[in-house]
Image (cartoon, rainbow, N blue to C red):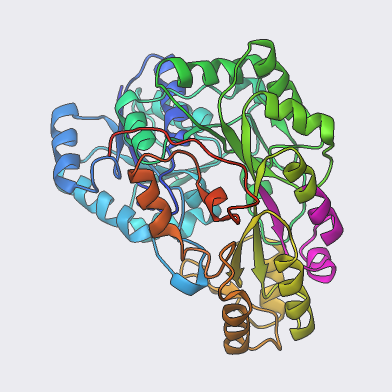
Amino acid sequence: MKILLIGANVASTPYYVYPLGLSMVAAALRKAGHVVTQFDFLRNDMSFEALDNELRSFKPDIIGISMRNIDNVNLMNEQRYIDAVKDIVKNIRDITNSPVVLGGSAFSIMPETVLNEVGADYGIIGEGESLMLEFVNKAASGKFPQKGCIRSSNYMDGKEIPAASYDPDIMQFYLKSGSIASLQTKRGCTHKCIYCSYPVLEGASIRPRNPGAVVDDIEILINDHNAKYIFFTDSVFNDDEESYLEVVKEMKKRDIYVPWTAFFKPEGLNDRHVELMKQTGLKGVEIGADASTDITLKRLGKRFRFKDIVACNDLFVRHGIATAHFYMFGCPGETKETVMEGLENIKNLHKTVSFIFMGIRILPDTVLHSMAISEGIVSPENNLLESVYYIAPGLDRGWLEKTLTEGFSGIRHCVFPPDSMDGSLQFLHKLGYSGSLWDMLIPADKKPGRQRVHAAI
């Protein structure tokens, strides 16, 4: 069958992110013999005329739409993305009667709600590589599900997760918009953070891909697409089982050196680990600190404490690796006292940049959601399609915003609101600088140097 896969993400800040999930579904469908075309909405300048032309020329039997985010989870500057998907579906209806199937993390978080809101025919909850393939194969013989939402209680084995079928034109667009290529080494999350949907989406156990297959992908990105910077999209790169080290060892075995970055948890690392990663090109790490005091860390379900965050930061800095931290204020247990303590904790971190969020976006089926219902912050009937943010009861939002604004004012490497530097980072990408670029916010006399690369504007 002929399948058109559409990447519906319209978020371009702080930098453009390649539609990796879309390409992995495309790989599974192509392997089974189906004809697949990938269409990225951002790459086509969000043009409905371009989408119309694709629909008319390709004449797909089935259309899949990948949804990355519902909104930007930023209380200080809320942006809603689902409306773009609604417009895409409406535009498709004007051209063809082919079935429209939704998928992606944003859909799986609140499937029935999103399906009703967007008006598509079906939706895949979970891993599209297996479920979309099953849907397409049955559709080829005229069999369609009776229910709109399609789910499975099983997860793919890590070694079954396919390599992405990177579209060369889409990839070049994203590389020129930030020079970052996306890659996944595993799925699943063993942590119990009360606000997070990763265990719901990917399961509570680690499912690593074959390290050789991962490094094959890296070589394809470097040799076939001329990627200069790699971003590992795993929810946490340094998993407790240390499968990440097998990937790094395979990179070193093949003499691969390419700048790369990933999300890290601030525990379970030592000098040997960091040195090994540095030898393969590790340039910067994004540390999921999330809360800034021991009290709020514990209430979020974190196993580590703030001293571990400090030690992790110092470990990377000692090896010349740039670090970024992300913090949320207003967590359960947050008080005026913890806010003031957290401000000082963050400001006292050395040689790093911190992005600060106010409030926590409440997502369905999380512990935070249940807590918010019991505390009267959200009603049980609220489907959460419209964003609701958790701020600890008794903590005044106006006071919190004023305190954070004044507390981080004039501190270049403490960014509040968290998107206040997005425009500058995008401009630097257009000038030819590569990577995530937040390391440029680290005080000049303390940060490691970076090289300028030349790329088309």
Question: Residue lying furthest top in this view?
Answer: 254
Q: Nearer the viewer, residue 290 or 40?
A: 290
Residue 308 falls inside the magenta stretch = yes
What's the magenta region? 286-312
Residue 190's image quarter? top right
Q: Is residue 106 left or right of residue 368?
A: left
- In this orientation, does residue 369 appear? no
Question: Residue lying furthest front in this view?
Answer: 445
Residue 102's image quarter? top left
Against 337, residue 372 (above or below) is: above
Residue in view at x 51 percent, y 47 percent: 105
Where does the image place residue 381, in percent across and percent down from the top left? Answer: 55, 74
Q: Is residue 146 left or right of residue 38?
A: right
Where does the image place residue 28, in percent across and percent down from the top left? Answer: 47, 22
Q: Nearer the viewer, residue 62 or 28?
A: 28
- Quadrant, the N terminus: top left
Residue in view at x 79 percent, y 64 percent: 297
Residue 342 falls inside the magenta stretch = no
Against 311, residue 357 (above or below) is: below
Against 188, residue 310 (above or below) is: below
